[in-house]
Image (cartoon, rainbow, N blue to C red):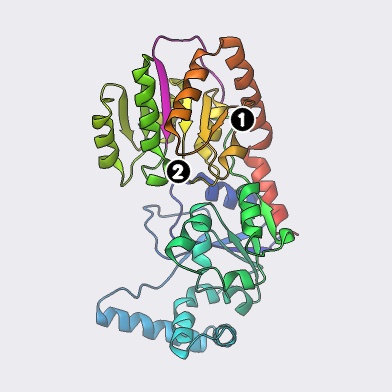
């Protein structure tokens, strides 16, 4: 594998907490791969990153600034990447694109045409849209990752956005077997799809807790405050739980655009004393919240897989999740946790109550299976080896 060159395309340089991409890049480098990161913009405050970073030119400037950037890119297309630019122009023409669109794509993708790569890998499906021919233009293999939102929701927002992509020679990475089956429904060959699940640092998220039952049950969710996380349904379930006299406290770690709506829901459901919004926390503080909780909830409407659920299982929490996409593979129903049909708050309430009323011995059986499975199947080294194999096949 020595000297194999991988180009990874993302929107931004991954932040410190975005461990998936950081671990992937680190694992590839340790196995002799050279990695370069292409980003649309660099919002990171870091002066150095794990690999070389190439930032796309910014055309959203004032007229003079835009003219200068277009002129620079045009000079580059003519003198630095003439062959690659011409190939991209011809390939886009074969796809029936009009002249103006072809020219715009040649200019917009210059930062991708400048490197000699073995693989060009788009980290999310939508990042490959309007760039379907770039890999072939530079003589590289093309790979695309789908992580959930981009496979299920982007086609609803952008009708037929992947038609051109699915007609190309591409190797796909998805997070779960269910996503693989859904991708096959677009007539993608099974041999071109590889499932590589998320992974966690099983040594950091280790099991070390007092499992004695307490009078007040501490329940936790770590999630971006977005409608797809289903937190409003979770709050409804907790309202029903309170009506039945169960004492609990629910902590939500995360920030997002739904904060105001969710706080209003807490008010309307009379859960002000039972619910705390912690906002975004660093890793060490998230770990403390996991150590202080007994039950973890991830009642999402849509979810690719979810690292937070893996972390909760590794820490010995009783995990209750929805049946959204990869969650039913993340948690095995009645074996390592519980899977509840989504959008059904009363069913969620019933399951939470069942978990609370279980004997400590029965809880420990579930806990031990979950911890063992996460340690054996979802550790970082396995994920890194899977990506080495992905680029070697």
Whether residue 1 is visible here, answered yes or no, is: no
In x, y percent, where is residue 328? 59, 38
Whether residue 351 is visible here, answered yes or no, is: yes
Compared across the picture, whether 259 is left or right of 38 comes to left
Compared across the picture, whether 194 is left or right of 38 comes to right
- Mark 1 to mark 2 CA distance (whole Å): 29 Å
Q: Which residue is mark 1?
A: 333
CB under 8 Å between discs 1 and 2? no
In x, y percent, where is residue 283? 44, 34
Q: Which residues are magenta?
A: 205-222
In front here: 337 or 26? 337
State yes or no: residue 220 in magenta: yes
> Which mark is nearer the camera, 1 or 2?
1
Q: Callout 2: few (<14), some (14-19), or many (20+) C-alpha neighbours within 10 Å?
A: few
Q: Helix or strand or loop: what does disc 2 sit on?
A: loop
Q: Tell me what residue is drawn at x 61 percent, y 69 percent.
A: 166
State yes or no: residue 44 in magenta: no
Q: Helix or strand or loop: what does disc 1 sit on?
A: loop
In front here: 324 or 392? 324
In x, y percent, where is residue 165? 58, 70
Quadrant of the image occupied by residue 117: bottom right
């Amino acid at each position: 594998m020595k000297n194999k060159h991988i180009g990874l395309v993302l929107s931004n340089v991954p932040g410190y907490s975005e461990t998936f991409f950081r671990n992937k890049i680190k694992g590839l480098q340790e196995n002799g791969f050279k990695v370069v990161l292409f980003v649309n913009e660099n919002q990171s405050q870091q002066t150095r990153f794990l690999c070389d970073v190439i930032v796309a030119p910014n055309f959203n400037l004032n007229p003079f600034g835009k003219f200068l950037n277009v002129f620079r890119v045009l000079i580059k297309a003519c003198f630095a990447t003439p062959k690659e630019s011409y190939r991209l122009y011809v390939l886009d023409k074969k796809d029936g694109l009009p002249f103006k669109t072809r020219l715009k794509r040649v200019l917009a993708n210059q930062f991708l045409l400048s490197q000699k790569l073995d693989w060009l890998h788009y980290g999310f499906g939508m990042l490959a849209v309007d760039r379907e021919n770039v890999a072939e233009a530079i003589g590289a293999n093309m790979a695309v990752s789908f992580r959930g939102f981009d496979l299920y929701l982007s086609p609803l927002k952008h009708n037929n956005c992947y038609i051109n992509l699915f007609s190309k020679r591409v190797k796909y990475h998805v997070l779960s077997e269910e996503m693989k089956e859904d991708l096959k429904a677009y007539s993608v060959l099974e041999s071109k799809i590889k499932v590589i699940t998320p992974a966690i640092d099983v040594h950091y998220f280790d099991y070390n807790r007092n499992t004695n039952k307490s009078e007040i049950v501490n329940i936790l969710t770590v999630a971006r405050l977005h409608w797809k996380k289903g937190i409003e349904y979770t709050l409804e379930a907790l309202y029903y739980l309170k009506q039945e006299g169960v004492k609990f406290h629910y902590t939500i770690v995360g920030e997002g655009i739904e904060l105001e709506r969710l706080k209003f829901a807490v008010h309307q459901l009379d859960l002000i004393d039972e619910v705390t919004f912690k906002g975004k926390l660093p890793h060490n503080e998230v770990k403390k919240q996991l150590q202080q909780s007994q039950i973890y909830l991830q009642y999402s409407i849509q979810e690719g897989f979810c690292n937070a659920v893996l972390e909760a299982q590794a820490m010995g929490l009783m995990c209750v999740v929805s049946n959204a996409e990869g969650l039913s593979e993340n948690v095995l129903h009645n074996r390592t946790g519980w899977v509840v049909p989504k959008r059904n708050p009363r069913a969620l309430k019933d399951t939470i109550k069942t978990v609370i009323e279980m004997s400590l011995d029965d809880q420990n059986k579930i806990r031990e299976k979950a911890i063992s499975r996460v340690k054996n199947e979802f550790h970082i080294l396995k994920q890194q080896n899977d990506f080495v194999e992905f680029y070697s096949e």
